[in-house]
Image (cartoon, grey):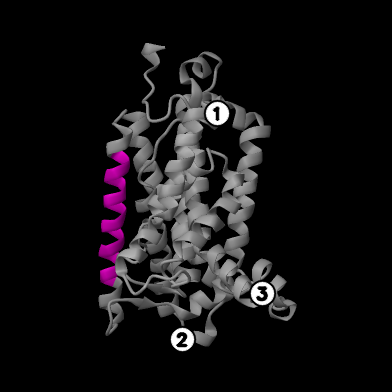
């Protein structure tokens, strides 16, 4: 019983890490007043860019045994960060510099990211000569998936706390660091001021465009790592077009569930991951009905709606989104 529970928790953590990367990145973005609904596309782009880097690196090797663990990790990570950074810059240029509608731009970015991912994914499948509609990067994935060697010897404790790859622990560290940054640093104070009242922040000498660009681009890079983690760790290095499902949208829902507190997302992402795999692993009885499985998939969204209703009823300032969220800033209207 204990081993089964430990296994389920570890699976929930693995499922929740991409959501944690995405929600942390989106929380930083929204704290600047930018509502980036392009997170699903950014995560998708981050994943395919990492796959591109890993694919060509593996093809350059004489044999799989010649792989360098350092390069096998760094090349996909840098490619993923670069791809998601470009997506963030596109969003900022359109919404901050050109003042385009943030909702429309974010949705367009999601469509664009998924399209780019599917295009290059299909291209790699073709030049790789795969007989199935997927790419397997087993050697690179093995470098990403390495866990602490003594985790297996510690029983349930090792399974629950020590059996993950470095990207999982990196996601937790980034989330905790983001929470400290927002609440206890001067940069975080300025960022929150930009999201709450950009006119007042501008009058105080804070560069609005700079903070919006920095928060959105850094948030996009963090979210892109969620896509990389999904491919290299959770999916064992296998890329298939349209395999991400609704994880990007769950990451955005997680932002609301954590009431814009990135460090709270550590436990919340595990909860979301646990709810998400209920329908995958047949943990709860379904009676053989596919409709019941679909109801299980709704649980994370239902919980988000409940939290949204409760926070709206209580109407506490600290539990509300930034006041200027989704609004373009015109300095002349200050």
Task: Verify whether residue 122 appears in magenta.
Answer: yes
Label 3: element kind: helix
Mark 3–mark 1 Cα distance, whole angstroms, equals 43 Å
Judged by depth in the image, the label closer to the viewer, 1 or 2, is 1
Q: Tell me, yes or no, whether the highlighted magenta stretch contains residue 108.
A: yes
Residue 240 placement: quadrant: bottom left
Q: Specify whether residue 245 is in view.
A: yes
Q: Earlier in the sequence, mark 3 or mark 2?
A: 3
Q: Which residue is mark 3?
A: 2
Q: Residue visible at 49% across and 35% down?
A: 310
| SS of the residue under disc 1 | helix
Quadrant location of the N terminus in the rendered image: bottom right
Which of the 4 image quadrants contains residue 305? top left
Asked whether residue 210 appears in the rendered view, the answer is: no
Crowding near pointer 1: few (<14 within 10 Å), some, many (20+)?
A: many
In the rendered structure, the answer to whether residue 314 lies left or right of residue 296 reads: right
Single out the mark in the foreground, 3 or 1.
3
Query: Spatial distance from mark 3 to mark 2, Cα to Cα?
Result: 45 Å
**What are the residue bounds of the magenta stretch?**
105-123
Q: Nearer the viewer, residue 105 or 124?
A: 105
Residue holding disc 2: 62
In the rendered view, tell whether residue 24 sits above or below residue 199.
below
Task: Tell which circle, 1 or 2, labels the residue nearer the N-terminal end.
Answer: 2
**Which numbered mark, 3 or 2, is in the foreground of this view?**
3
Residue at which label 1 appears: 192
């Amino acid at each position: 019983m204990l081993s089964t529970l430990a296994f389920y928790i570890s699976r929930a953590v693995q499922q929740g890490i991409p959501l944690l990367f995405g929600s942390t990145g989106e929380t930083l973005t929204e704290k600047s007043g930018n509502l980036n609904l392009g997170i699903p596309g950014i995560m998708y782009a981050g994943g395919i860019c990492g796959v591109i880097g890993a694919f060509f690196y593996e093809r350059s090797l004489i044999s799989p045994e010649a792989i360098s663990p350092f390069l096998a990790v760094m090349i996909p990570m840098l490619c993923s960060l670069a791809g998601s950074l470009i997506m963030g810059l596109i969003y900022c240029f359109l919404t901050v510099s050109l003042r385009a509608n943030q909702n429309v731009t974010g949705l367009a970015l999601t469509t664009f990211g998924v399209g780019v991912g599917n295009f290059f994914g299909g291209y790699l499948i073709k030049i790789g000569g795969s007989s199935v509609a997927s790419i397997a990067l087993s050697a690179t994935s093995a470098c990403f998936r390495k866990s602490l060697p003594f985790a297996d010897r510690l029983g349930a404790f090792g399974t629950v706390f020590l059996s993950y790859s470095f990207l999982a622990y990196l996601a937790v560290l980034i989330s905790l660091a983001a929470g400290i940054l927002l609440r206890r640093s001067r940069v975080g104070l300025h960022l929150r001021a930009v999201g709450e009242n950009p006119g007042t922040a501008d009058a105080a000498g804070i560069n609005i465009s700079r903070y919006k660009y920095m928060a959105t681009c850094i948030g996009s890079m963090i979210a892109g790592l969620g896509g990389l983690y999904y491919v290299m760790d959770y999916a064992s290095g296998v890329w298939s077009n349209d395999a991400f499902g609704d994880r990007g949208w769950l990451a955005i829902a997680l932002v609301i569930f954590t009431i814009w507190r990135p460090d709270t997302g550590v436990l919340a992402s595990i909860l979301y991951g646990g709810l998400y795999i209920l329908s995958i692993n047949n943990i709860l009885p379904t009676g053989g009905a596919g409709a019941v499985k679909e109801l299980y998939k709704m649980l994370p969204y239902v919980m988000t709606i409940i939290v949204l209703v409760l926070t709206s009823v209580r109407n506490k300032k600290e539990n509300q989104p930034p006041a200027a969220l989704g609004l373009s800033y015109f300095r002349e209207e200050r």
